[in-house]
Image (tube, grey):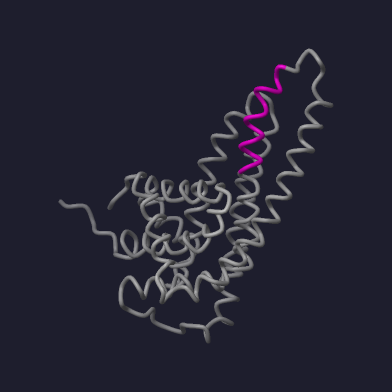
Amino acid sequence: MNNNPLNGPKYLLRGIGIIARPRLRRFVLIPLLINMVLFAGLLWVMLLGMEWLAGELDAWLPDWLDWLTYLLWPVYVIAGLLLPVFGFVVVGNMIASPFNGLLAEAVEQELTGRPISGASGWRALAAEIGRTMRSELRKLGYTAVRAIPILILLLIPGLNVIGSMLWLVFGAWLMAIQYADYPMGNHGISFPEQRATLARARLLSLGFGGSVMFLMMIPLVNFIAMPASVAGATALWVDEFSKPELPPPD
């Protein structure tokens, strides 16, 4: 199996090309609109938060520790950029998850030429809402248990550098889990099985998730991040994970 992290971004770029195909545009429209509205709101919240943080740092540090500001600011800027991304992932995907599932289904059929067995299309949307909402809640619990200790590290001077590195790695893993869920969920693969599947090519998964996280931090370009990530994750599923893992040769 391909486990090269440099191939991860290639799947995201492929996803961008896939969503531009005429037959898929109607599936992209709703996730795209949700993405635009949420990112505008989260950007506003981030700017307010950075302004508040600047005032808090000035008030909290005594004059003789002013030099620490230069060490702490890069850490808080990274956190300030990533927190809106995670906020978007949680809120945006909760809202758009049924439509993302339909998009993943349409992309897989486009790539393979075969429909997914079982209920499909817009008439399956009601069933898709229930399934994807349960999946999003499971991912939210998984994220919270692991994110809270890292956030605590970010608040501790000296350890916040380690916390920032862990936050980046965890963020990349979370993005891979988040978007691979849509094609895998369409095939009835459970959340623990999804994580185990991605772990078979962990570096590739981290490369894909890291590129998604990077795309989400680029203004204006990030509007296409959600549908492109769904399409890219579906291509990743089709190429790398949908086939049974072969046993090693004797």
Q: Is residue 70 magenta?
A: yes
Q: Position of residue 8 (x, y in %)?
A: 38, 50
Q: Position of residue 138 (x, y in %)?
A: 59, 61
Q: Is residue 227 left or right of residue 154?
A: left
In the orientation shown, which residue stands out farthest toward the right? Answer: 59
Q: Which residues lie in the magenta part?
A: 67-81
In the orientation shown, which residue stands out farthest toward the bottom? Answer: 123
Identify whether 244 is placed above or below 129: above
Q: Position of residue 159 (x, y in %)?
A: 63, 27
Q: Which residue sits at x=36%, y=52%?
A: 10
* 180 or 59: nearer the viewer: 59
Q: Is residue 248 left or right of residue 5?
A: left
Identify whether 71 is placed above or below 248: above
Q: Residue 95 appears in which quarter of the rendering?
A: bottom right
Q: Position of residue 192 (x, y in %)?
A: 48, 59
Identify whether 149 is placed above or below 96: above
Q: Which residue sits at x=59%, y=54%?
A: 142
* 28 or 92: nearer the viewer: 28
- Chief secondary structure of the magenta span? helix
- How many callouts does the rendering have? 0
* 131 or 63: nearer the viewer: 63
